[in-house]
Image (cartoon, rainbow, N blue to C red):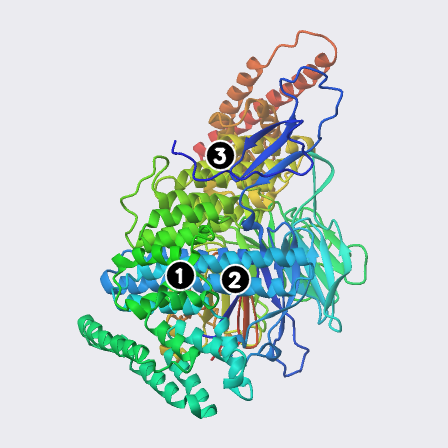
Amino acid sequence: MEDIYAKFVSQKISKTRWRPVPPGSLQTADIFAAGSWDNEENYVSLWAIGDFGNLDSDGGFEGDHQLLCDIRHHGDVMDLQFFDQERIVAASSTGCVTVFLHHPNNQTLSVSQQWTSAHYHTGPGSPSCSSAPCTGIVCSNPEIVTVGEDGRINLFRADHKEAVRTIDNADSSTLHAVTFLRTPEILTVNSIGQLKIWDFRKQGNEPSQILSLTGDRVPLHCVDRHPNQQHVVATGGQDGMLSIWDVRQGTMPVSLLKAHEAEMWEVHFHPSNPDHLFTCSEDGSLWHWDASTDVPEKSSLFNQGGRNSTFLSHSISNQANVHQSLISSWLSTDPAKDRIEITSLLPSRTLSVNSLDVLGPCLVCGTDSEAIYVTRQLFS
Amino acid sequence: MEELDGEPTVTLIPGVNSKKKQMCFDWGPGEMLVCETSFNKKEKSETEPGCPFIYIIRKDIDVYSQILRKLFNESHGIFVGLQRIEEELTGKSRKAQLVRVSKNYRSVIRACMEEMHQVAIGAKDPACGRQFSSQVSILSAMELIWNLCEILFIEVAPAGPLLLHLLDWVRLHVCEVDSLLADVLGSENPSKHESFWKLVTILVLQGRLDEARQMLSKEADASPSSAGMCRILGDLMRTMPVLSPGNTQTLTELELKWQHWHEECERHLQDSTFAASPHLESLCKIMLGDEAALLEQKELLNNWYHFLVTRLLYSHPTVKPIDLHLYAQSSLDLFLGGESSPEPLDNILLAAFEFDIHQVIKECSIALSNWWFVAHLTDLLDHCKLLQSHNLYFGSNMREFLLLEYASGLFAHHSLWQLGVDYFDYCPELGRVSLELHIERIPLSTEQKALKVLRICEQRQMTEQVRSICKILAMKAVRNNRLGSALSWSIRAKDAAFATLVSDRFLRDYCERGSFSDLDLIDNLGPAMMLSDRLTFLGKYREFHRFYGEKRLTDAASLLLSLMTSQIAPRSFWVILLIDALPLLEEKEVVFSAEQTYELMRCLEDFASRRPVWREPGVQQLQEDVENTKLEMLRLALARNLGRAIIKEGSLEGS
């Protein structure tokens, strides 16, 4: 990918997220949010890519991203999600969940809502309660779900001061990420390699289903759901493996794909082109996985700089009776179709790539080497 | 010890009067703690209250600059890339690679300098602006030194091309000429511009003769009286023999041609061709390399190294690298003219011209406020195989010493520590121990950060550190009542003792509440269960409960028995296990076989005989009564079961 722009920003970036484009508009992504971690002062910032950046006639400036505004954030930014066009929800290592409001008129950010101790420990060593990092957020207007190192799940509503629902001790280990499955159902991944499905309609603190990797309890760090086929879920683990799950059947992953050499921090299906998947890792790499069926024509183009997949298909599902066209390319068990092209997107290996986001033809990622990379020609 | 190279700088700590008070200090890895003390001060120490503060003193303040952080991060990538190109290449391609790396470093410095410059201009506070401006000049000096080192040590340009490189070097760093050029050319009548002659002179001084000739032709157009002279001088400029990169002519040919040209210039001067125009005459003198004429242009030359290069251009264009230092020294002396003494930058450049790499690095270390420059430059020069002979009387070699200093500075920073890891990796002798010492001091605020530190340690097989990090996290989890987490961490650390401790907590909680917590973990222990006996017991005991819940009574019974007979259950837990056997004994179906019942009885008697004997009456008496009742009930149940089992087994055998 020659059109990838790097900018050093003097802070380690933990999260990057595109602002969603209004539904039905033809606009492409032009603004993203970024959060920093491990600084003495951490920030949530908004950045613009766009044509007003290219004042200089020489092409070098074009595509470069410019800071629009930023605001202090107490603690490390552990997760970041756009709630709607103007509001951003940030998870803090202090256990606080904050909603920031963006004012486009004067380009400023302000705090619009805050749940200060959403996540906390109650232990013998801490008489009252000590804060626990909030590790993951997922938003679906008007609901916000947060998970944390305290194994707690909170359900907030944007206009409510208190949590609408809290599941204490939902998990005995650290919850690392959360996503919506179907509207009242969420999916969490934890540090002992389990995937749990929770149904908010049910009372009590028991999950409705537990799926897990076999025996070795490798921690799972990230999860994403297929945008169209809600039963298909991808997770990334501490050993860098990518697992594809079919939550309708079995308690084990459909396939395990050998991927990165260290923790996979994020995995994302392309929202409008879900045959494409993106992963990033502690080992400093950012990968584009292409499982579209018309691979043969493309292969020559995509092979350069990438590597072919080493595939450990681990098919356990019995899909002979399912109509072929209904099966997602990610669940395909036909060996001839198990062709996934993998392309490495970053020019050279850097420190950990902590976060990535894709929207339309645009991709943004943030790293520990204090650079934000942006490309606007993913499928060129 | 060698003698000191310069006076140590004095740092005053605001708020501490070091004349009146005593101070004490302690070294840290990257910083120092200082506080007031009343040690050994006998008279009236309590009357005057001391300063209540402890000061943290950091030596490497540049690490804390927002803009320089970009320099550190970007150059980190180049550094790592440089360490990797190493082995494969040899000869020409290797040199080309090294030059490219050097240029990359320089372009990072320049980018940083430009940003700093922008900030300095935009600064509202003048003091702040001055600080940024001084940073800009430091960066600019770093780039200047680096560039010269690149030409002399990495490129190793031979006579001929050497001068071309030096000319580029001067042109790159004396850059106001371009704005002046635009200014003059932009005016209505360039040749009447007040700076016209200044511009032409600068162009000639920098050897930009084509441009100078174009300017002269403008002058010729404007004033016909001097047109002839301008044409002659222009011709001289055009015919000056220069080495062009693609040309195959030998150095001797060039020298010969140049000699002819030089004589022609001299002849014109002697014939007073330019007598009518002092400007043109002085230009001609410059082109003859006349020292006095050059020194007249001191202001335009700015500095002695510009003077040196111009002087070489017009008097010794094929200067050999080996002779450079002679000209450099004399140029410096001539230029300063005894009026002022050389500055640190002058000494550094002079040392470079003398090809004394160690002197360059030493002077830079003293003059510059951070280790970034010397560490990276030394590393690059080391890759050029220029530093092998030199060993320090402490630590290992110089490259490693400087890299260690730089990396330690990074580790003292709350956020840049991740960069330091790779620098330590490439220090073969002391890198590993330094990393071990530093990595343990990283505060682990979140699990995510801990995982990153763990990954660094695991990749380098630093088992001791891995264990200690996992232990810290497990301890934290216990303190926060997160037993599941604590157990996961002790399993990851393979810490049997701690796993036992956590398992005991689980069992205690079970005794208090009658139910297990964190089943999602305990039910999925797998092979990790074997880490410690207590953990195995915990896992197996939970398995017993599961069997019982699933009505797999025979499995449950044999598991329960084996927990006792294999001695895996802690003694204190036996009574609970025996009582757990009660409902199984009371089942309608016979669950325990006769054989198993005998074993259970043996366990029971074994337990009863080893029970501590209560001496004191009172509460203990009551407790003993309760236990005795339980034991009696068990004995009864066992006897009944034995009978049923014998009958059942006997009748089965008979049938």
Tell me the crowding category of disc 2: few under 14, some 14 to 19, or many 20 or more residues within 10 angstroms, Cα based. many
* Quadrant where the C terminus of chain B is found in the figure: top left
Residue B348 in sight: yes
Q: Is residue A327 left or right of residue B353?
A: right
Q: Is residue A174 above or below residue B312?
A: above
Q: Position of residue B634 (x, y in %)?
A: 61, 23
Q: Measuring 42% from the left and 47% from the top, which residue is drawn there?
A: B363
Residue type beneath disc 2: Cys
What subunit carries mark 2? Answer: B
Secondary structure, mark 3, is loop
Tell me the crowding category of disc 1: few under 14, some 14 to 19, or many 20 or more residues within 10 angstroms, Cα based. many
Residue A202 in sight: no
What subunit carries mark 1? Answer: B
Q: Nearer the viewer, mark 1 or mark 2?
A: 1
Same chain for marks 3 and 1?
Answer: yes
Do the numbered discs 3 and 2 sit on residues whose CB atoms are within 8 Å?
Answer: no
Give B125 or A288, whichever is nearer the viewer: B125
Q: Nearer the viewer, mark 3 or mark 1?
A: 1
Q: Measuring 68% from the left and 78% from the top, which residue is drawn there?
A: A22
Do the numbered discs 1 and 2 sit on residues whose CB atoms are within 8 Å?
Answer: no
Q: Which residue is mark 1?
A: B305
